[in-house]
């Protein structure tokens, strides 16, 4: 009998970025636990500010939602192939800090798809 080989990463080729490949971590029990730890505090604060009605609450909620998006990408984007940013190989961190926002959004969508949760479930992660 042969052995089964499960790959813990998947490759995504973002539309509009020829030659660029995103290596996305697949979900596992340990990785889900790690992600829950990272997102727990921020998501609790996000719910608090989303409940408020003021412009300040709205701004704070937007900032916290962006922080959660950042956490997802840091957590799930293991490697970027085929992209240099300012002459250096791109990483999740450099993509966030100084990369094209459209590519960041595609990486975020790929990570969210791999997580496999709908919006309500992501809020409770």
Image: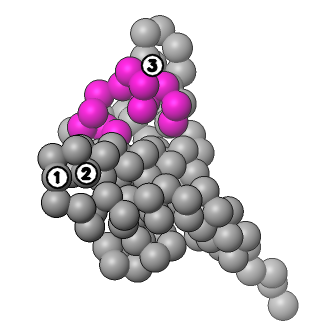
Image point (52%, 31%), residue name: 93
> Which secondary structure lies at badge 3?
strand
Q: Nearer the viewer, residue 65 or 75?
A: 65
Q: Which residue is mark 1?
A: 54
Question: Which comes sooner in the sequence, label 2 or label 3?
Answer: 2
Image point (69%, 76%), residue name: 29
Question: Which comes sooner in the sequence, label 1 or label 3?
Answer: 1
Residue 94 lies within the magenta run: yes
Label 2–label 3 contact, CB within 8 A: no
Image point (46%, 76%), residue name: 124
Q: Which residue is mark 2?
A: 57
* Residue 56 falls left or right of residue 74: left
Image point (51%, 36%), residue name: 92
Q: Which residue is mark 3?
A: 84
Disc 3 crowd rating (10 Å Cα; few below 14, some 14-19, many 20+) is some
Q: Nearer the viewer, mark 2 or mark 3?
A: 2
The location of residue 38, given as percent across then percent down, is: 60, 56
Q: What are the residue bounds of the magenta stretch?
A: 92-104
| Residue furthest right in the image | 1
Give how far apart the Cα atoms at labels 2 and 3 are. 37 Å
Q: Is residue 105 above or below residue 90?
A: below
Residue 65 lies within the magenta run: no
The location of residue 28, given as percent across then percent down, is: 66, 73
Q: Is residue 60 above or below residue 20?
A: below
């Amino acid at each position: 009998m042969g052995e089964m080989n499960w790959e813990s990463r998947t490759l995504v080729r973002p539309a509009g970025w020829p030659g660029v490949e995103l290596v996305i971590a697949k979900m596992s029990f340990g990785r889900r636990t790690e992600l829950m730890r990272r997102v727990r505090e921020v998501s609790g604060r996000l719910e608090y500010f989303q409940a408020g009605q003021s412009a300040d609450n709205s701004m704070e909620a937007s900032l916290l939602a962006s922080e959660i998006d950042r956490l997802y990408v840091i957590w799930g984007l293991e490697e970027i192939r085929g992209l240099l940013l300012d002459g250096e190989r791109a990483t999740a961190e450099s993509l966030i800090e100084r990369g094209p926002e459209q590519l960041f959004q595609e990486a975020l969508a790929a990570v969210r798809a791999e997580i496999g949760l709908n919006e309500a479930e992501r809020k409770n992660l």
